[in-house]
Image: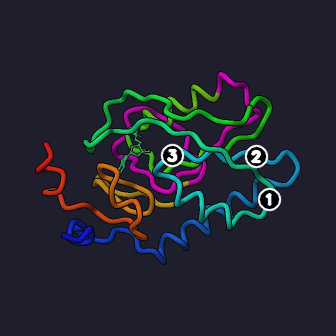
């Protein structure tokens, strides 16, 4: 079966994503400048496609770094337990940092990242996320730049996965519930 057969519907089209990412970049371009330029930290793996498009729209000088955080495994809900699989290469002490996330859901992952970064004494930390599911929040976390608010549905595509698949889809889609229900 094709991957597209597992998609119930397209929630955000490729075109709409590009418009939203352009808007996020515009907000960031108005804030940051070449003086005191930031490090963008891409949270792997989900944010890789967002970062790739976002960085091309940014007009200020910046560096890129990557951090991989454990996710849910095969399930679709958060355990709240978070683990670093790949740490930053850069020393962020005294630096301006932008966390680049795919989606903020319960908030546990971002909360963990922000606490962890705070202990490294950066000059500032802001958060840019492609998607935001505020109705699912369990921990209050600051979101400075957000592409789209979405309802409480499990989405895939544009970097986001289910069981490591569907990341390559160029749109954000809702997965047919039977795809993950058969795994439970
Ligand atoms: P949180 O810790 O519950 O906020 O979840 C954050 C992480 O869970 C994200 O970075 C994603 O990797 C994953 N996640 C949350 N919701 C979804 C979804 O709808 N589809 C795919 N991954 C998701």
Residue at the limit of the structure toward the front, as seen here: 1
Q: Label 1 belongs to which residue?
A: 60
Q: How far is disc 1 from disc 2 in space, using C-alphas?
A: 9 Å
Marks 1 and 3 close (CB-CB < 8 Å)? no
Label 1 vs label 3, nearer the camera: 3
> What residue sits right under mark 2 in the picture?
38
Nearer-N-terminus badge (3/2): 2
In depth, the one of 32 and 42 nearer the eye is 42
| Element carrying mark 2 | loop
The count of marks equals 3
User: Mark 1 vs mark 2: which is more N-terminal?
Assistant: 2
Residue at the disc numbered 3: 44
Residue drawn at 54 percent across, 35 percent down:
86
* Cα gap from disc 1 to disc 3, whole angstroms: 23 Å
**Quadrant of residue 61 in the image?**
bottom right
Say what secondary structure mark 1 lies in: loop
- The residue segment tinted magenta is 118-145
Depth check: 142 or 111 in front? 111
Mark 2 burial class by Cα count in 10 Å: few <14, some 14-19, many 20+:
many
Q: In x, y percent, where is residue 3?
A: 26, 68
Q: In the displayed orientation, state which residue is furthest to the bottom.
A: 15
129 drawn magenta = yes
């Amino acid at each position: 079966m094709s991957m597209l057969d597992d998609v119930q519907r397209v929630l955000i089209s490729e075109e709409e994503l590009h418009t939203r990412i352009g808007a996020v970049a515009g907000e960031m371009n108005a804030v940051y400048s070449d003086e005191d330029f930031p490090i963008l930290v891409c949270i792997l793996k989900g944010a890789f496609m967002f970062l790739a498009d976002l960085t091309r729209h940014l007009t200020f000088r910046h560096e890129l770094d990557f951090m991989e955080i454990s996710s849910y495994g095969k399930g679709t809900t958060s355990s709240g337990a978070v683990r670093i699989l790949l740490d930053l290469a850069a020393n962020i002490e005294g630096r301006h940092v932008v966390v680049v996330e795919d989606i903020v859901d319960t908030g546990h992952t971002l909360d963990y990242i922000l606490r962890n970064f705070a202990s490294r004494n950066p000059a500032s930390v802001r958060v840019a996320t492609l998607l935001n599911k505020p109705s699912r929040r369990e921990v209050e976390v600051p979101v400075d730049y957000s592409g789209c608010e979405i309802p409480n549905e499990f989405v895939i595509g544009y970097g986001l996965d289910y069981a490591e698949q569907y990341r390559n889809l160029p749109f954000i889609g809702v997965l047919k519930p039977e795809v993950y229900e058969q795994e439970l």
